[in-house]
Image: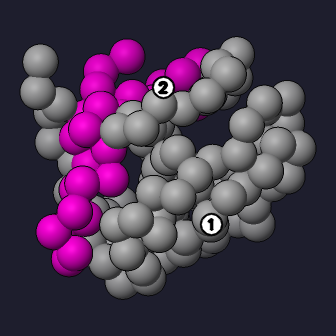
Amino acid sequence: MVDVRVQNATRGTVLAERAGLAIGFWDRLRGLLGRTSLLEGTGLWLQPCNSVHMWFMRFPIDVVFATREGRVVAVVPTLRPWAMTRPYFGAAVALELPVGMIARTGTALGDQLIQEPACV
């Protein structure tokens, strides 16, 4: 899986220095399953994706939903294990992050996300 760096261009903040890019069916299906935590500075960029579930997950996460162009259409802080989001029909991307990242970066509806290759 390729890693990308995800920035909030509107706020001038970095959401993830290294987010896994899950664009294939199997990568999206697996998601974060099997992990015991999500380290600071990491995340998972799922595309296409307009909702997520936390079945069999062991830890909560923050989730940012965005359009194909990276415009934020929903933020879901502290999504707990066994919960699920509703579908966000304008979303094409879900960015899964460590809990607290939405608050720390001030990410809000309408913000513009940019992804670029992560530094090696």
| 76 is higher (above) or lower (below) than 40 | below
Kindly report the distance in space between the C-alpha atoms of the residues bearing marks 2 and 1.
23 Å
The 10 Å Cα crowd at callout 1, few under 14, some 14 to 19, many 20 or more, is some
| 70 is higher (above) or lower (below) than 23 | below
The numbered disc on residue 24 is 2
Residue 109 place in picture, x, y as percent:
44, 82
Per the image, label 1 sits on a secondary structure element best described as strand
Viewer-closest of 1 and 39: 39
Residue 7 place in picture, x, y as percent:
22, 56
Residue 43 place in picture, x, y as percent:
44, 38
Question: What residue type is disc 1 on?
Answer: Val
Any part of residue 24 in sight? yes
| 95 is higher (above) or lower (below) than 71 | above
Residue 111, quarter of the rendered image: bottom left
Viewer-closest of 23 and 14: 14
Assess whether residue 30 is covered by the magenta stretch.
no
Query: Which residue is disc 1 drawn over?
Result: 76
Q: Residue at x 52, y 58 (%)?
A: 100
The 10 Å Cα crowd at callout 2, few under 14, some 14 to 19, many 20 or more, is few
Nearer-N-terminus badge (2/1): 2
